[in-house]
């Protein structure tokens, strides 16, 4: 918008306008009013003059900093380079005045932008390095700025910018920076303000890059590995302090050069334990960003040290500590904070996987076992679960599934599933089940003498209703992450997973989706009232079709019907996910060529069906059967019965019975068929008749089709000649009546075991030498040497453009 800068004097020259300056600056930011594409040179120079005048005046320096915050990102190169050093010096004066704590956030924000943009120009960087940087860093490390969280986070952001873009000039004050950062490690505000902790950890991650880089970055590389080892040893020391009374945990000796952390001295062991917990979480946050943040040189990651530290803490769990006979208040408190400690360690493991990737393949079994053991101790038995009740350790299990997705995507089929595949899938399937109470209560009011109405009928009381408090969002996060983890595992390792697991996953997924398709109330199938869980379920069904087991058929027919019904989901994101899934399976539903899959042996399929499921029948109690079964119908159970019908299995759908549907029901319009399987060897099409004769219909290919014999090498494709095509068409034509025959029909005679040398079949070269007896027709030529059959079929052949003349 042109001319907006003409309003600047109204907001800068009057007292009333200064109160609305922030709103005006937001408008300028939206319209890019100080940019070269909008503002002309005269207006921009006038705005720069106003800013410089405001910065030179101590009373209006704050308004000048607010204007400068908008101008820095929009002004051109010439304007920035000519005023950068002056602006930096003027804004630094805001950190010296008596109101530095109040205006400090604005000053630090503007200084950070000035330093980031100035690093792109060597001449500006040289001037700022010699005149400003060391003074600014010393000013930011003053204790006065590190006592209030509202200003500390902005001070740390500015300090991080100095270390990132001016690491070499900051080398002279590296010790001051390190002492200031370590003094904040036990600050109470770090535990309540995640943004403050993240900014502090980012500053800690920049410490190895402070100072000279040396020859080809050798000094930076040495600084990084040294600082990483110091962090790991400091974490070990914190673990030693927290678990000093736990005999099951061995003490880890620290190195001779750990971080110089302040000593923790509290007489109350509970307070001391919580301080150590805070220190442990902060150190892990610094280690995470040290691993993931970019570094000027290649990192030499100590993988074994990190895995040893992670394994040491994940070996403990809250249940084992709280159930010991000698458990006291200290151990109970320690057991209560273990989930938070393991959450921080899992973040370290996630960063290690993201950085190293293929370098961890030799330790794949160890990494997978770390995930599985956390899932095992956080598992809630199926018989202790309740509908609409959040299960314990849900946040930790969700984090494990999220990290497991990253590990499987990084390592693919070499992720180490071998020995723990059954345990892992039992944990995953238990989190996607629909839990149903095993006892159903029916309240029946006893007969009573109700009031009599005017018509002489007794007025019955309203039947009783059982009300239950349910959390409709319970366990939705865990279910959504478990579905995503299953989809990732099937995508990367689907064909390598046992067919029994594929079968069980198909049974659970299809039972839930068909129940939704049949119109079940979403609030009765928790947690699938959450759109994220339904979208994850459709995604898992897609992966079951795209990445099946070679020994078990994919649920293609079911997926087509279920996904088409999912297009009507009330949530738009879920229906969009179904559209994507349908588009991805179209190549399987309508293939462009014949399948390359081999036939599945029925004996092998029956042995897979007879194997025991991972959940030992619990899926039958958790999932309501919705698919048609081949078993005869049973009478309805009694009111107080606690028995549940068995879950519908895929193998039970081989011969579904005929059912009666309501006129408007979903089942009357959607047919769910059994999965398509390749025919067994005994039912394949045979090219030989029962009496030993070959069937000419199979032996004679259509026109333009290349035939390949298994007894001869593959030949280049060729188009049939005209005589060969005529013979094929003649054999396919119906016989003519006596009246329709030509007056001079061709003379024919029947011969046996004699092939025509002039009309040799296309497949004669591929036939074996010992041919069975066949009856063939040999057509004789007339006296003029012309085959009359060619003349009678010329009109018919005129439409076949692919037959050569």
Image: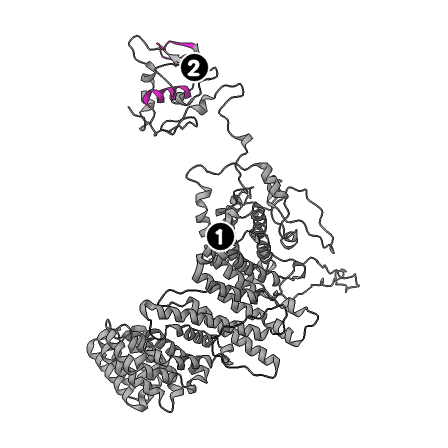
Q: Position of residue 84 (x, y in %)?
A: 26, 79
Closer to the camera in the image, 705 or 351: 351
The secondary element bearing badge 1 is classed as: helix
Which residues are the magenta region? Answer: 721-750
* As drawn, 534 above or below 705: below
Q: Residue at x 31, y 28 (%)?
A: 801
Number of numbered discs on residues: 2
Task: Please tell me how crowded label 1 is: few (under 14), some (14-19), or many (20+) other residues with Cα within 10 Å.
Answer: some
Its colouring scheme is: one colour
Q: Residue at x 42, y 69 (%)?
A: 225
Which is more foreground, mark 1 or mark 2?
Answer: 1
User: Mark 1 sits on what residue?
Assistant: 414
Q: Does the stretch in magenta take in 654?
A: no
Q: Does the stretch in magenta take in 741?
A: yes
Q: Indicate the quadrant containing the C terminus: top left, top right, bottom left or bottom right.
A: top left
Q: Residue at x 34, y 30 (%)?
A: 716
Q: Earlier in the sequence, mark 1 or mark 2?
A: 1
Q: Indicate the quadrant containing the N terminus: top left, top right, bottom left or bottom right.
A: bottom left
Q: Position of residue 78 (x, y in %)?
A: 21, 75
User: Mark 2 sits on what residue?
Assistant: 776
Side of 770 relative to 117 (left or right)? right
Task: Please tell me how crowded label 2 is: few (under 14), some (14-19), or many (20+) other residues with Cα within 10 Å.
Answer: some
For the residues marked 1 and 2, what is the alpha-carbon distance in whole angstroms?
Answer: 61 Å
* As drawn, 40 above or below 553: below
Q: Position of residue 115 (x, y in %)?
A: 31, 77
**Quarter-wise, where is residue 586 in the image?**
top left
Closer to the camera in the image, 257 or 301: 257
């Amino acid at each position: 918008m042109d001319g907006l800068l003409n309003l600047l004097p109204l907001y800068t020259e009057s007292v009333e306008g200064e109160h609305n300056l922030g709103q005006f600056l937001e408008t300028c930011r939206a319209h890019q009013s100080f940019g070269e594409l909008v503002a002309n040179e005269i207006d921009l120079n006038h705005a720069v003059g106003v800013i410089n005048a405001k910065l030179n005046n101590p009373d209006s320096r704050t308004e000048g900093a607010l204007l400068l915050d908008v101008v820095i990102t929009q002004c051109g190169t010439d304007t920035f380079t000519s005023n950068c050093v002056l602006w930096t010096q003027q804004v630094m004066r805001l950190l010296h005045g008596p109101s530095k704590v109040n205006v400090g956030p604005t000053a630090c924000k503007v200084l950070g932008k000035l330093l980031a943009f100035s690093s792109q120009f060597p001449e500006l960087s040289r001037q700022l390095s010699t005149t400003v940087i060391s003074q600014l860093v010393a000013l930011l490390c003053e204790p006065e700025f590190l006592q209030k969280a509202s200003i500390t986070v902005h001070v740390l952001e500015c300090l991080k910018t100095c270390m990132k873009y001016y690491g070499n000039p900051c080398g002279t004050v590296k010790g001051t920076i390190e002492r200031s950062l370590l003094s904040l490690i036990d600050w109470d505000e770090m535990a309540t303000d995640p943004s403050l902790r993240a900014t502090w950890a980012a500053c800690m991650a920049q410490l190895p890059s402070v100072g000279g880089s040396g020859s080809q970055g050798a000094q930076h590389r040495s600084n990084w590995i040294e600082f990483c080892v110091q962090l790991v040893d400091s974490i070990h020391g914190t673990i030693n302090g927290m678990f000093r009374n736990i005999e099951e945990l061995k003490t880890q000796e620290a190195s001779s050069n750990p971080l110089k952390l302040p000593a923790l001295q509290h007489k109350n062991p509970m307070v001391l334990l919580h301080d150590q917990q805070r220190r442990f979480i902060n150190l892990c946050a610094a280690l995470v960003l040290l691993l993931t943040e970019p570094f000027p040189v290649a990192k030499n990651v100590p993988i074994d040290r990190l895995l040893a530290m992670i394994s040491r803490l994940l070996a403990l769990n809250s249940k084992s500590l709280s159930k010991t006979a000698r458990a006291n208040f200290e151990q109970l408190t320690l057991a209560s904070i273990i989930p938070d400690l393991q959450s921080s360690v899992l973040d370290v493991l996630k960063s290690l996987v993201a950085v190293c990737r293929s370098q961890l393949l030799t330790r794949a079994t160890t990494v997978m076992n770390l995930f599985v053991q956390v899932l095992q101790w956080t598992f809630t038995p199926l018989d202790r679960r309740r509908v609409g009740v959040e299960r314990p350790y849900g946040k930790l299990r969700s984090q494990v599934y999220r990290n497991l997705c990253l590990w499987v995507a990084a390592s693919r089929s070499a992720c180490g599933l071998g020995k723990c595949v059954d345990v892992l899938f039992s944990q995953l399937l238990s989190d996607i089940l629909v839990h149903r109470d095993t006892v159903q209560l029916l309240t029946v009011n006893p007969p009573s003498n109700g009031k009599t109405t005017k018509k002489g009928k007794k007025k019955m009381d309203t039947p009783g209703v059982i009300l239950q408090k349910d959390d409709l969002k319970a366990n939705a996060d865990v279910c959504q992450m478990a579905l995503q983890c299953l989809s990732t595992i099937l995508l990367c390792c689907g064909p390598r997973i046992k067919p029994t697991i594929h079968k069980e996953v198909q049974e659970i997924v299809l039972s839930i989706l068909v129940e939704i398709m049949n119109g079940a109330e979403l609030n009765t199938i928790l947690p699938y009232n959450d759109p994220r869980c339904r979208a994850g379920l459709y995604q898992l069904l897609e992966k079951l079709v795209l990445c099946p087991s070679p020994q078990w058929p994919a649920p293609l027919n079911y997926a087509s019907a279920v996904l088409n019904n999912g297009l009507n989901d009330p949530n738009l994101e879920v229906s969009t996910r179904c559209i994507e899934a349908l588009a991805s399976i179209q190549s399987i539903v309508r293939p462009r060529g014949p399948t390359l899959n081999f036939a599945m042996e029925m004996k092998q399929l029956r042995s897979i069906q007879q194997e025991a499921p991972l959940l030992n029948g619990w899926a039958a109690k958790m999932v309501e059967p919705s698919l048609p079964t081949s078993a005869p119908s049973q009478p309805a159970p009694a009111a107080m019965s606690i028995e549940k019908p068995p879950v519908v299995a895929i193998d039970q759908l081989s011969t579904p019975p005929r059912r009666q549907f309501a006129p408007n029901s979903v089942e009357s319009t959607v047919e769910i068929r059994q999965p398509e399987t390749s025919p067994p060897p005994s039912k394949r099409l045979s090219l030989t008749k029962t009496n030993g004769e070959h069937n000419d219909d199979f032996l004679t290919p259509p026109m333009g089709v290349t035939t390949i014999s298994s007894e001869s090498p593959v030949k280049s494709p060729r188009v049939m000649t005209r005589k060969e095509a005529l013979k094929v068409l003649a054999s396919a034509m119906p016989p003519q009546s006596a009246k329709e025959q030509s007056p001079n029909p061709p003379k024919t005679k029947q011969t046996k075991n004699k092939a025509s040398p002039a009309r040799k079949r296309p497949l004669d070269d591929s036939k074996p030498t010992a041919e069975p007896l066949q009856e063939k027709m040999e057509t004789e030529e007339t006296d003029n040497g012309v085959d009359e059959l060619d003349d009678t079929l010329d009109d018919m052949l005129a439409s076949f453009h692919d037959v050569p003349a």
